[in-house]
Amino acid sequence: MALKQDYIRKMEIRKQRKVEAGVVSDRFPEIRNMVIHMTYFHDAKNPVLMERTINVFPTSIAYFNMECMTKGCDNGGFDLTPVISRLVKHHKKSAKGNMICEGKIEEFSSDHAKVSYQINITYNKRLS
Ligand SMILES: [Zn+2]
């Protein structure tokens, strides 16, 4: 039971953070469109856990803290927000990188999960 309550509590926190994040057009008005491609790796024989592509529009929620897919991972995840902020600040079109989950998990080592990401941004034309 405790586990289930813990899960519900986490989902509530996530929901609240998403509400607070607002929408992309408010937070990053320069962005017309953004594509985030992520590959999830975990500590196993077959390390690729999954791949996903996220299309972000001005109306999307500006929440880019991606969940860690490892069961039981506490406070983990991959926060792409600083990467995206940096890109927008310098008006760069793309970025690539890796990120390791900092979450804690009992039966696994600290490097239980990582992602490699690629972000492509299309900007709005500047109004002159
Ligand atoms: Zn994790």
Image (cartoon, helix red, strand yellow):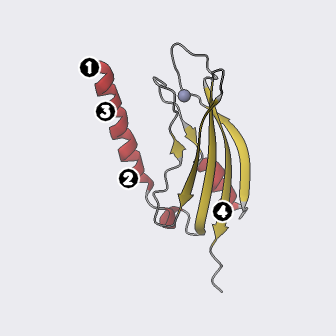
Q: Are marks 4 and 3 in contact (CB under 8 Å)?
A: no
Of the two numbered discs 3 and 1 on the same chain, state the one appearing first in sequence: 1
Q: What element does badge 2 sit on?
A: helix
Q: CA distance from mark 1 to mark 4?
A: 43 Å
Label 4 – label 3 distance at C-alpha:
34 Å
Residue located at (49% from left, 25% from top): 73
Which of the marked residues, 2 or 3, is nearer the chain's N terminus?
Answer: 3
Secondary structure, mark 3, is helix
Upstream in sequence: badge 1 or badge 4: 1
In which image quadrant can residue 51 be found? top right
Q: Which sits earlier in the primary sequence, circle 1 or circle 2?
A: 1
Question: Is mark 1 in CB contact (under 8 Å) with mark 2?
Answer: no
Q: CA distance from mark 3 to mark 1?
A: 11 Å
Marks 1/2: CA distance?
27 Å
State the separation of the CA atoms marked 2 and 3. Answer: 17 Å
Q: Which mark is residue 19?
A: 2
Q: Residue furthest front?
A: 46
Tags 2 and 3 touching, CB below 8 Å = no
State which quarter of the image contains the C terminus.
bottom right
Relative to the observer, which residue lies in front, 26 or 117?
117
Which element is circle 4 on?
Answer: strand
**Which residue is denoted by mark 1 in the rendering?**
1
Q: Label 4 amino acid?
A: Ile
Question: Residue sitting at 65 percent across and 67 percent down?
Answer: 122
